[in-house]
Amino acid sequence: MSEPGKPWDEGGPERLYTVSRGRAPQEPRHRPVELVSLIVARAEPEPGMAPEAAAVLRMCQFPLSVAEISAYLVLPVSTVTVLLAGLLRDDRVEARAPVPAAVLPDPDLLQAVMHGLQNL
Amino acid sequence: MVFAGTSSGGGSSPGGRRPASTLVWVIPPAAMAFCAALAVAVVPSGARATVAWCGVAATLAVAFAAAEAMRRGRLISTLRTRLAAQEAESRQRLAAQEAEIRRLTREVLPATVARLRRGAMVHEAMKDVDYAPRLDPDFDAAHEQLLRWVLDTVRTEEDLRDAAQRAFVNIARRVQAIVHQQAQDMREMEDKHGADPDVFEDLLHLDHGNALIGRLADSIAVLGGSRPGRQWQKEVPLFNVCRGAMSRILEYERVDLHSVADVAIVGPSVEPLIHALAELLDNATRYSPPKTRVHLTAIEVQSGVAIEIEDAGVGLSEEARRRTDAVLLQAATGFDLNDLGETPRLGLAVVGRLAVRYRFQISLRPSAYGGVRAVLIVPQDIICPTPAPGGAIARAAKLPPPKPIKRATPLPSPTRTGPLAQGRPGPGFRQNGAGLPQRRRRMPMVAPAPQSFRVDSAPPAAPAPPREPAQQPVQPGIWLDAFTKGLNGEPIPAADAATDAPDPRTSPSAPDSSSTPNTPHTQNTSDKDE
């Protein structure tokens, strides 16, 4: 899977399970964030934090999707989800659904309006 | 004869003094001659001649006996002195030999064996031995032979041990290579299946097991006199080193990583430090109750960085402490493969070895929590300033996310209002960043889809397909409709409307866009109609 010519010191010495402190993400429907949820930081990074959490807080001063965070950190989505779940629990970040469902107009209504207008 | 014997005895016994003895041997013949003369004078004249002859003969005999006795006495005395000299000489020689043998056992042998152990050949080790030519050659030859024989035996044993250790290290290296390959593959798989929590969890589980195997292989390599596995070229922040150590023990979840000094460890020392810390952490978690936490902190001290591992376990009795110290110390002097099976606490031997080799100071003391407090002091010369304060992120160190966001502080109002429909219309975002707005403008396009795909929960694949069918049936008809109507009516404003419509309002969702061009257009047409 990986080419043999790679140097031995690829990446850091730690493995992913220490980054997520051994917790796997919960069941998909209980997960607090989706792949497309937007994350906004609500706190400044603190000195004692894990570097990943601090990085999330730093980069999420501007809303970023979970997928983007995962890409920036080069961490799998599941790990990022666990990280974010921890941050959400501490109210350090805020997650919001990509587009609130209520804002979307009802297609049926639009269709009815369209038909009505066409019938004018 | 008896007289002669006593006289000689009396003559020699007063001492070996020559003048006395010469005087002494004259006395008996003189006495004899005096007696003979007296007898000649006393006896009647008829027997005088006979008596005189007898007297002369007796005097001669006595003189001869006295002279002989004297000679023998002298011989005996010379023999006796020679014997004494010989005895003294042999005693001295014996003492010298004893001293030589003592020197052999106390100085020469240990020194040469030590030299052998350090890898010298037999003849090299023998060359420096100071032979003592003061003794007879036979003894020296035997001496040398003995030394050579002992050294040869030791050398053979050492070779045997080296071969065994090399075999160990060799096997450990192969295991390490496989484990490392596995770890890399596993990381790639984790990236690949990161979105599937079930697979991901299993992968983490396997990854953890793999890391444990790796640590065991590292331990064997270290005990075999080699360095632990990987080589790090760049310095690694201490935080990541600590976390690396955590990732190699069974119960890493029980380790609380507290404040860690913002320093980095230079490349060559990273792996030994990780390994030593992992062994200490393993010890701490293994010998403390499963519910308790193990605290890991690292603070800067005068002589370097002190890494503390504190557990709330069974503690350390004075005797146990002495034993662990002994294990640590013994590891410094050398390692016997025989110990491998006997010491259950293999970890301490490994830590001891690493400590000696890389000059870590290690102390195990009773902790305030009742458990053990292990302190490992990293020397100053393997510490360097860290390139990533707070710890580096696994692979992404080179890609810190864009930071111009700082300027976005006036923005919170649109972001906080939540509904993106409001924040969307261009102007607010265009001012902010170059890269991000585009990405976000694309998001809302995906947005209508969630309603459909949120149910089937297949996030990455979902966005594209649902949109297409939504657009396909509606859009062409509308566009065509608008186009034909525009052509029929006023061409220029209609074209404007048509070109305007997609540009700022592609941002709204697909059904929106399908409806929005529709509404202005119908309005237009209705306006025209009116």
Image (tube, coloured by chain):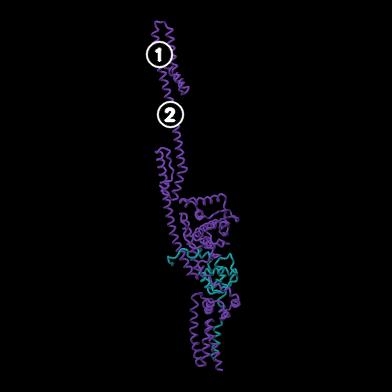
Regarding mark 2 in the picture, which secondary structure is present there?
helix
Give the residue displayed 42% in from the left and 21% down from the top. B70
Which subunit holds the residue at mark 2? B
**CB within 8 Å, label 2 to label 1:** no
Residue under circle 1?
B58
Residue B159 visible to the viewer: yes
Q: Colour of chain B?
A: purple
Give the residue displayed 48% in from the left and 84% down from the top. B472
Q: Colour of chain A?
A: cyan
Work out whether A9 lies above or below B488.
above
Q: What is the number of the mark on residue B37? A: none
Q: Amino acid at mark 2?
A: Arg
Residue B410 horizontal/vertical position (percent): 60, 76
The quarter in which the N terminus of chain B is drawn is top left
Residue under circle 2?
B82
What separation in Å lies between label 2 and label 1 (alpha carbons)? 36 Å
Q: Amino acid at mark 1?
A: Ala
Furthest residue in direction front, as rendered: B19
Residue B277 horizontal/vertical position (percent): 53, 58
Q: Earlier in the sequence, mark 2 or mark 1?
A: 1
Q: Is residue B257 left or right of residue B192?
A: right
